[in-house]
Image: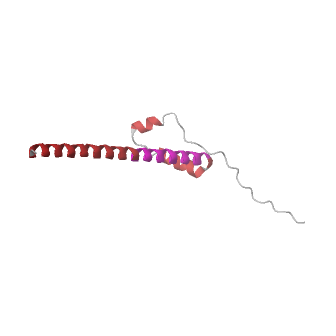
Amino acid sequence: MDYAKKREEALKQVEQAKARLAALDARANQAARKADTKRKIVLGGLLLDAAEKDEKFARVVSALMGRITREQDRKAFSGWAPPVPPEQPQPRAPETAAHE
């Protein structure tokens, strides 16, 4: 058999293997980005839900909003207001019984 043909065939197999590896790497990277995006969405939803119920988390959301620096990110929140928890009734001091 001709060694030039064998070499050519081997090079072709190497290139095909490289292409398969690149495709696998691309799919793995895409899956990692998708999982990262899902975590961010879930965490953001949890934070917003907590901010609707707890003043502490509402302050955190407001502080985070103040840290947005990119104009395109600011535009995403145009017209949107962070959630505000309902007013919590202030605990009343226990009434003391007047003894006569």
Say left or right for 26 vs 81.
left
Q: Nearer the viewer, residue 48 or 79?
A: 48
Give yes or no for residue 45 being in the magenta stretch.
yes
User: Image quadrant for the N terminus?
Assistant: top left
Q: Nearer the viewer, residue 33 or 87?
A: 33
Provide residue 81's location: percent of width, then percent of height: 54, 38
Q: Residue drawn at (49%, 48%), measured in percent from left and top?
A: 63
Q: Nearer the viewer, residue 20 or 43?
A: 20
Provide residue 90's location: percent of width, then percent of height: 70, 52
What residue occupies the far front of the structure in this picture?
1
Say left or right for 16 vs 35.
left
Provide residue 20's location: percent of width, then percent of height: 28, 44
Q: Residue drawn at (9%, 44%), measured in percent from left and top?
A: 4
Q: Main secondary structure of the magenta part?
A: helix
Q: Nearer the viewer, residue 1 or 84?
A: 1
Q: Which residues are magenta?
A: 32-52
